[in-house]
Amino acid sequence: MNGKTAHWADETAAKIIREKGEKDVYVCASGITPSGVVHIGNFREIISVDLVVRALKKLGKNVRFIYSWDDYDVFRKVPANMPRQEDLKKYLRFPITMVPDPWGRDDSYARHHEADVENILPSVGIFPEYLYQTSRYRGSIYAEGIKTALENSEKIRAVLDKFRDEDHKTQDDWQPISIFCGGCNRDDGVLILPWDGSWNVSYKCKNCGCEKTVDLRRASEVKLGWRIDWPMRWAYEGVDFEPAGKDHHSQGGSFDTSRVITKEIYNNEAPVTFRYDFIGIKGTSGKMASSSGNVIDLKTLLRVYTPELVRYIFAGTRPNTEFTISFDLDVLKIYEDYDKTERIAWKLEAVKNESLFQKERRIYELSQPGELPSGPPPQIPFRHLCNLLQINGMDVEKTVSLFTGVSGEQQERLRARAVCASNWITDYAPPEFRFQLREAGEKAELTEAETAALRGLRDDVIAGIEAYNGEKETAQAIYDAAAKYKIEPKALFRAAYQALIGKDQGPRLASFLRSINKDRLLSILERY
């Protein structure tokens, strides 16, 4: 890249090396609380880290990509899109890992959402190392970090209060830890007694009356508060890079406090970071949230966009840019934009300068779930696939078989795109985009002039359509037919669409006619 970075992920990788120095292994981190469906807003963080990981590896660096499941967080709210609402409410204030799976598939509510993500990330080429905070806390891995926080609780309190207004400062009984009662598993009624400076912590529970003293080196119910847990783990794992949403990056937010706490309490420098913005769903308002149930997840996205398109959407957008995920007609343009980037990357389409080529080439590289194809893949436009699918009764295999020159890996790529096109037509395409070819013998109600012109189109154009060299010549022949039969082109188009699909409008007519088997076309039009 001539010494210049062509992508924001490369810029970030260079910054990590510059600020953290040369290291044997760079640690890049991400994580989420599995409080509900892990949505595409959460996925933005995952793929942002993956892109930076790839950029570091491109520079020859060894990278550890860790993804923390904060499944020892408290279950605060039942999302609206969860089944068995009343049953789940019985477990409010439990650790999420102790909430049963309402679907009965996995060991817990948390594990259900974790498994959904872990099973689908490989399809988009993402393979992090998963850390489960329940096992780490219950295994007392963080015992030293917890004791350090207790020893420095007044310093931590001062840091937190420095960034808060008077109404939100810590209370007199504040502690840097929370406890899930060993008797009832809840955290909301637990009174943590004054710490004696040893490894022991004592507590009383108002809910069940439990009184207990636990040794931090063996305790399973003690954890750090969020704003202390995060900086402690940065130090424990040696995190070099971790992005965060704009809420965490707000002034005085959790990143500001964590930066100070990890340095002053844990003698550690905060990771390199950047802020990523929220994602909306086109046609809705407000940010997605697992707790509210207002979400679109990666599985849903992959029903409409192939893995390389999913990666392209994020790789082609700077993290601090807010955008919406579209499921309407914009889908057609997004596929077209990707195809253009692919042509540029393989130098099949020229751009104005080398810098723009490098940028598009890098976006294309980062969009691939795996290795780059060995050569430029054959491009089948998404819009064209949608038309072919509808012409062929939504039969994916029949549609794929039409492309006789495509085989092997490229055929699988085409099949995946065709499946996405089928899903989009079925679930999201507007009614005006959908159509179904009439059966032979059906007849539209047309005027005499329209019928005469349609007959001319059939006999003068369609009967010899293979003689026309491409769509442009076919289109001209259609206009010539309209002139010959003294009818406005628009009226002929309407007559053709009515005769073929029973609508006033449809796909671009010249391309449409060339996409349909000639004998089938003639059989539909023979009654005219």
Image (cartoon, helix red, strand yellow):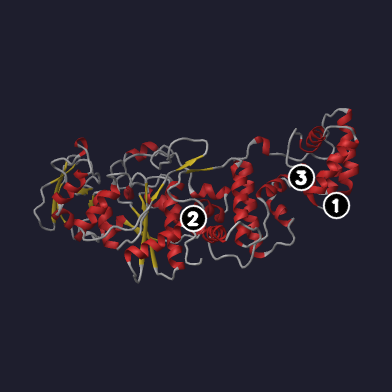
Q: Position of residue 193 (x, y in %)?
A: 12, 47
Quarter occupied by the C terminus: top right
Residue at coordinates 41% horizontally, 62% vertically from top-left?
13
| Residue under label 2 | 120
Q: Nearer the viewer, mark 2 or mark 3?
A: 3
Residue that protrudes farthest toward the top in the picture: 447
Asked whether disc 2 touches disc 3, contact meaning CB atoms under 8 Å apart, the reply is no
Percent x, y of residue 149: 18, 54
Residue 170 position within the rendered picture, expressed as x and y whole percent measured from the top left: 18, 41
Amino acid residing under circle 2: Ile
Residue 108 visible: no
Task: Compare marks 1 and 3 and give the one earlier in the sequence.
Answer: 1
Check disc 3 and report its element: helix, strand or loop.
Answer: helix
Marks 2 and 1, how far apart in space? 45 Å
> How packed is label 2: few (under 14 Cα within 10 Å), some, or many (20 or more)?
some
Q: Is residue 196 visible?
A: yes
Q: Is residue 482 left or right of residue 67?
A: right
> Where does the image place residue 10, in percent across and percent down from the top left?
45, 61
Mark 3: amino acid: Phe
Q: Residue furthest front?
A: 353
Q: Nearer the viewer, residue 147 or 398?
A: 147
Q: On the image, numbered disc 1 is attached to which residue?
A: 466
Which label is found at residue 512?
A: 3
Three-letter residue code for mark 1: Glu
Which residue is rendered at x = 21% and y = 38% of the image?
165
Q: Earlier in the sequence, mark 2 or mark 3?
A: 2
Q: Relative to 113, say whether 427 is above or below.
A: above
- Viewer-nearest residue: 355 or 481: 355
Number of marks in picture: 3
Q: Residues within 10 Å of mark 1 (few under 14, many from 20)?
A: few
Task: Name which residue lies at 42% across and 57% down.
Answer: 49
